[in-house]
Image (spheres, rainbow, N blue to C red):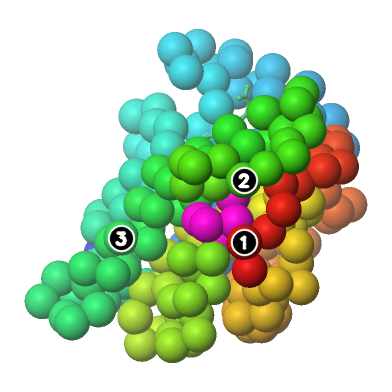
Amino acid sequence: MATPDITIYHLEGRRSERVVWLMEELGLPYQLEYVRGDLMASMAQVRALGHEMPMVPTVVIEDEILVESGAIIELILARYAPGQLAPAPDSEHYAKHLMWMHYAEGSLAARLFSDYRAWRTNPPTQRSRLVDSEAVVQFAENHLAEHQWFGGADFSSADIMMLFPLDVATNLNLVDVDQFPNIAAWKERVTARPAYQRMLAAARPDGIIGRLPPVTQRPPSER
Ligand SMILES: N[C@@H](CCC(=O)N[C@@H](CS)C(=O)NCC(=O)O)C(=O)O
């Protein structure tokens, strides 16, 4: 298998940690670019690439500049680590694995950040009829009541995708952490992994910096 030529543009505590964590799990080499302790300076490095969509992660793979953490992870697995950290396409676990891979950004992160923006400006007094933060996190909680991991019988890239938004949910006070014990236990399992700890040492040596302020008010829970 080819050795990847990958540079990860990174911000501490943000989605680029997924790609660093993946590379550590796979034991593959990578270059990591960020300015320690300075989010603005790290973002300036991203912008200097001249890509139309300056987001993090931005990853340069061979001579291609890519954004979207889920796509980056799928590309790295397909090209450099086939058969690792994902069930085989004909496995009984594959469909759910793919669903959680995409749910992490498509519904979970999207609805969490949408509520965050709305609730910071207009503190809510009642539940929305739309699927809200509590509902999208509850779906993950219910899955973990029956399964140890998101992507099948083993730890997989779906777990890597899911950690960032599930941390956002509790760190920004969008849900009550005590209502989701299965998620709390799963977080302990995934963050205890040696590769996650190596990611922290390389990519978050001083902890999360520039945290967003949490919301002070949530709508009444339905539970
Ligand atoms: N869906 C994208 C989201 C990327 C994203 O929004 N990243 C944030 C950091 S976690 C960012 O670039 N923020 C800077 C900005 O939006 O200007 C992914 O999964 O990569």
Q: Is residue 152 magenta?
A: no
The residue that appears at 54% across and 46% down in the rendered structure is 132
Q: Residues within 10 Å of mark 1 (few under 14, many from 20)?
A: few
Three-letter code, disc 1: Glu
Percent of width and height locating residue 191: 68, 74
Q: Quadrant of residue 128?
A: top right
Q: SS class of the residue under badge 3?
A: helix
Q: Earlier in the sequence, mark 3 or mark 1?
A: 3
Q: CA distance from mark 2 to mark 3?
A: 26 Å
The residue that mark 1 highlights is: 222
The label number, if any, that marks residue 127 in the structure image = 2
The residue that appears at 44% across and 88% down in the rendered structure is 146
Q: Earlier in the sequence, mark 2 or mark 3?
A: 3
Q: Residues within 10 Å of mark 2 (few under 14, many from 20)?
A: some
The residue that mark 3 highlights is: 99
Q: Nearer the viewer, residue 16 or 112?
A: 112
